[in-house]
């Protein structure tokens, strides 16, 4: 059976990266921005526990895109039938966490890829790319909690780095509700807190437009006021992260302009 060329083959035995971290008094090793050569845009995100690498391919001609229809005029968006498409792929690296590794493309990965696509579609101006498709690929390198929120934020940065026209950036924020007797909502929970949680919620927000791009909840039900409080906390968390994303996008644009050939 042929193997999956997109799967990263990890070693049989591995060591935690903390063993190779710089000790006290030692300067950490410099890290260059994560740029993937085949990709038009890419982003690497470390949000405490989770570590995500995201890349954007395209726009490229979609299947059947050359047949029929008229071209969109300059400055105008194509009709809905000719609008571009956004395809998302989500994968976990074999060494991403303590969870038992399953075959690539399993049910959980497909569900997260579908949630990623549904949250990114309202943001991109796909009408400006008629009969074309954009491919977003997210690879989870370290699972420290918020397995969907971190790829959402990284994908938004990668789309901005690829110069894809968007209405706004998407900021993802994860929450989990602790079990009784103290059912409080935790913002950006760790993996252990997620495993012990009674319920979870992931919020995808467009901060400037103040619109919700995606919402995914799981676990036990509860009072309406409890879920409303979770959404309020998620919105506040997204608003606090937005200036950081703006700064990262500006720095990436300056770096790209400085490295461009004269």
Image: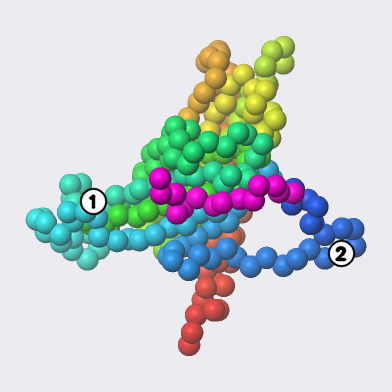
Left or right of residue 180: residue 21: right
Left or right of residue 211: residue 225: right
Q: Which residue is mark 1?
A: 83
Write the start and end of the magenta stretch as one range: 1-15
Residue 89 higher or lower than 230, as above or below: below
Mark sitting earlier along the chain (1/2): 2
Q: Is residue 250 part of the magenta span, yes or no?
A: no
The residue located at (51%, 76%) in the rendering is 257
Q: Position of residue 244 (x, y in %)?
A: 61, 54
Left or right of residue 170: residue 146: right
Give the quarter of the figure containing the N terminus.
top left
Q: Position of residue 40 (x, y in %)?
A: 42, 65
Q: Which residue is outermost to the bottom? A: 262
Q: Which residue is mark 2?
A: 26
Q: Please tell me whether mark 1 or mark 2 is closer to you in this view.
A: 2
Q: How is the image coloured?
A: rainbow
Q: Which residue is outermost to the front? A: 1
Could you tell me if residue 165 is visible in this image?
Answer: yes
Q: Which residue is outermost to the left? A: 68
């Amino acid at each position: 059976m042929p193997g999956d060329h997109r799967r990263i083959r990890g070693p049989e035995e591995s060591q935690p990266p903390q063993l190779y971290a710089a000790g006290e008094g030692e300067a950490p090793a410099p890290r260059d921005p994560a740029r993937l050569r085949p990709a038009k845009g890419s982003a690497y995100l470390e949000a405490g526990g989770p570590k995500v690498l995201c890349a954007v391919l395209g726009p490229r001609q979609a299947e059947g895109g050359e047949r029929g229809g008229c071209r969109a005029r300059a400055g105008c968006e194509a009709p809905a039938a000719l609008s571009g498409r956004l395809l998302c792929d989500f994968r976990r690296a074999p060494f991403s966490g303590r969870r038992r590794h399953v075959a690539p493309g399993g049910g959980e990965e497909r569900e997260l890829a579908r949630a990623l696509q549904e949250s990114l579609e309202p943001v991109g101006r796909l009408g400006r790319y008629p009969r074309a498709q954009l491919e977003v690929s997210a690879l989870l390198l370290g699972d420290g909690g918020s397995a969907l929120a971190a790829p959402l934020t990284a994908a938004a940065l990668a789309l901005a780095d690829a110069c894809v026209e968007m209405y706004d950036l998407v900021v993802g924020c994860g929450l989990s509700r602790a079990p009784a007797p103290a059912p409080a909502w935790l913002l950006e929970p760790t993996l252990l807190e997620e495993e012990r949680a009674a319920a979870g919620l992931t919020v995808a927000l467009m901060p400037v437009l103040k619109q919700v791009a995606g919402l995914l909840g799981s676990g036990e039900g509860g009072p309406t006021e409890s879920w409303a409080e979770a959404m309020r906390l998620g919105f506040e968390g997204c608003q606090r992260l937005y200036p950081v994303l703006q700064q990262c996008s500006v720095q990436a644009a300056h770096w790209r302009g400085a490295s461009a050939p004269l």
